[in-house]
Structures are given as C-alpha cells and as structure tokens.
Image: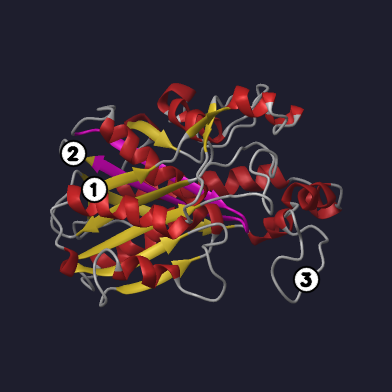
Amino acid sequence: MRCDNPVYIASAATWLPELVPLGKAVEEGLVDAAHQDLGYTSIAVAEGIVGPDMAIQAADRALKLSAVAPEDVGLVLHSSCWFQGLDMWTPASYIASRTVGPYAVPFDLGQKCNGGMGALHLATAYVSGGFTEAALLTTGDCFAPPMLDRWNMQLNMIIGDAGTALVVSRRAGFARVLATAAGADSSLEPWFRGDAPFRSMPGQENPVRVIERGARHAVTPEAVGSWERYEAGLLRTAQQALTDAGLTRDDISRVIVPFMHRGQGQAENYDVLGFPEERSLWEFGRRVGHLGAGDQFAGLDYLCRTDAVAPGEAVLLVGSGPGFTFASAVVEIVDTP
C-alpha cells in the first residue's frame, strides 16, 4: 500500500522496566541450556504493573514529544500478546480515556507479536484516507509468572516486558510512511496450538506450554517445510512494502525485525531479508528481549534516541506473529526527532 497522501510518524516512545542480566537469571536457575546461548545479555522484567499501564506511560511520552493535540487523535489501536490485567474488558478504551480522551475510537488488536505492525498498517490507511488527523498506537505486556515462563516459553527467544507507542499524523513528523504491507500464511497456525485440546475457560493450562505444543506439531507431516514457508511470507511482505515505496534493500539504512535470535549460526530474520546484523537492531534487542508486539516501535524509538538515523535515510520495519501473519513498513526519516 503506497502512501500517496502524506502520513507521518510524529513520535515514538518506550517504557522499559528494570533490565535483568541474563547471567543473574542463569545463576538463579531460571534459564535452561537451550536459551542460554541465544545472544541475549539482559531482559526487561516488570513487577507490579500491567501491560495497559505500561502502554499509557509510553503513550504519554509519545504525545508530549509530538506536535499532535490529544483532541486530534481519532483512533487508538492497542496491541498485546498476553493477559492485560482483567478478563472481559477493553484495554484500548482504558488507554484512550487516560491519554487522548473519551471520543477517540479504540480497538484492541490480538494478533500477538505482529499486532504493533498490523496496527501501523491499519492506522496508515485510516489516516491516509482522511478519517482522522492522527492515531495513537500502543503496545504493552507483562509476561509474569507463574502462568508464563518468559525465559524458556518459546524457541529462539526470551520475552521482555515493555510499553511502546507511536503517534501517526497527517500533518508532520520525524518520519514519513512511504508504504506498508500485510500478508499471511495460515498453514503455519498449528505451531502455537499443536494438538492441545480446546478449553471452556482461561487459566486451565498453568504454565502455558507453547514450546511443547510446537514440539508436538514439529513431528507431524504438516510441519514439513515450515521454515521455508515462514521465510517466503516474511520476504513477500517486506518486498511488497519496498516495491510500493519505490526502493530496494540497498536504499535501506536500518531494518527492524522481531528481537528474537536463533543463535548457533542459524539464519536470523535479518539474514532472511538480506541484511547483515550490523544493519539490524540486535544490539538493542539483545539487551531487552523480545517485547511482544512492541519490538518495532521500541526499535524506531531507539534509532531516534541514539541518533542512529539521519534525515534522508530509509528504515524498513518488519513484523511477524503466530498464525502466521506478516506486516512491513518503509519510512523515510525527514527530520531530527
């Protein structure tokens, strides 16, 4: 989706809790052998705060950094991966009422790790179409025990806590959205389900055994060729965004992919997309962990805070999530945040 009408990212912000050194977690016996050598050095671990409140912390900062008045925000999209503090309620409405007021239209997106990038894709179309002057996008998760074992819950990652936010505007910003794209390969859906039976209420699987579900699916005929299908979906969606933006990989200064790492010389997401590690944000991701739906928002914030990008440079943001869905965006830095 090429953005013929100007759409800008007015600001980006991140709220991070304490970073726990991986070595300390290993000493405490929290990290199994398979997760000790993925390349992480520390993980963001929150206590006493839920995902929506982390999102509000990030949103408040993003709104202050932007030139957008709260009353101009007509859409709030909140993305998350895990429990948001209460069953049967609407976190997006809570976040909207405490940041931009009661009249912005709020929606919760539940597409797990691809929720943030999916929100950017949807909000870009909404803002470009003139339905609102601006949109607030947030993510927030606390992957707390005992129901989740953040250190060993899934292959190729250790999960961190954070709140993140973007403000998207029709008027101005530090980055212009050139194009976005979304895609899917739902044949990969069983990787997070396996052969687990459906249940009538939450909380009956404690802890949640995602990695075991995947292991059971891995030995089925349907799992053959899964990594190749994942690669194809990731590449197809990223290439669509690049094509619509009129750019190639050579035009991209930095690429932000999910903060997961296979380690041991295996192909990483940035490898799949044709980028070396130094053009990725693994130097940041390895310090905070995989932030659920917030990796790309936090990554863009990090690039700006560290002056790692300059006006005229282009950044490719790529997301993926269980299901599997994919989303990408190409943004051009037009000003110093």
Q: Earlier in the sequence, mark 2 or mark 1?
A: 1
226, 157: nearer the viewer: 157
What percent of the width, then of the height, locates residue 177?
27, 50
Indicate the amino acid at tag 3. Phe
Q: How far is disc 3 from disc 2 in space, using C-alphas?
A: 47 Å
Q: How far is disc 3 from disc 1 in space, using C-alphas?
A: 41 Å
Residue 252 falls in which quadrant of the image?
A: top left
Indicate the amino acid at tag 1. Ser
Which residues, given as a range, are shown in magenta?
312-332
Q: Is residue 133 visible?
A: no
What percent of the width, then of the height, locates residue 136?
29, 61
Q: Please say if 225 is above or below 93.
A: above
Indicate the amino acid at tag 2. Pro
Contact? badges 3 and 1 (CB < 8 Å):
no
In the displayed structure image, the side of residue 4 where residue 233 appears, left or right: right
- Element under label 3? loop
Q: Which residue is mark 1?
A: 11
Q: Which residue is mark 3?
A: 198
In the displayed structure image, the side of residue 143 where residue 169 appears, left or right: left
- Image quadrant occupied by the C terminus: top left
Residue 40 falls in which quadrant of the image?
A: top right
Contact? badges 2 and 1 (CB < 8 Å):
yes
Q: Which residue is mark 2?
A: 337
Instruction: Bin the neighbour count of mark 3 within 10 Å (Cα to Cα): few under 14, some 14-19, many 20 and up.
Output: few
What percent of the width, then of the height, locates residue 302?
34, 34
Q: Is residue 46 visible?
A: yes
Q: Please say if 294 is above or below 118.
A: above
Q: Please say if 15 is above or below 171.
A: above
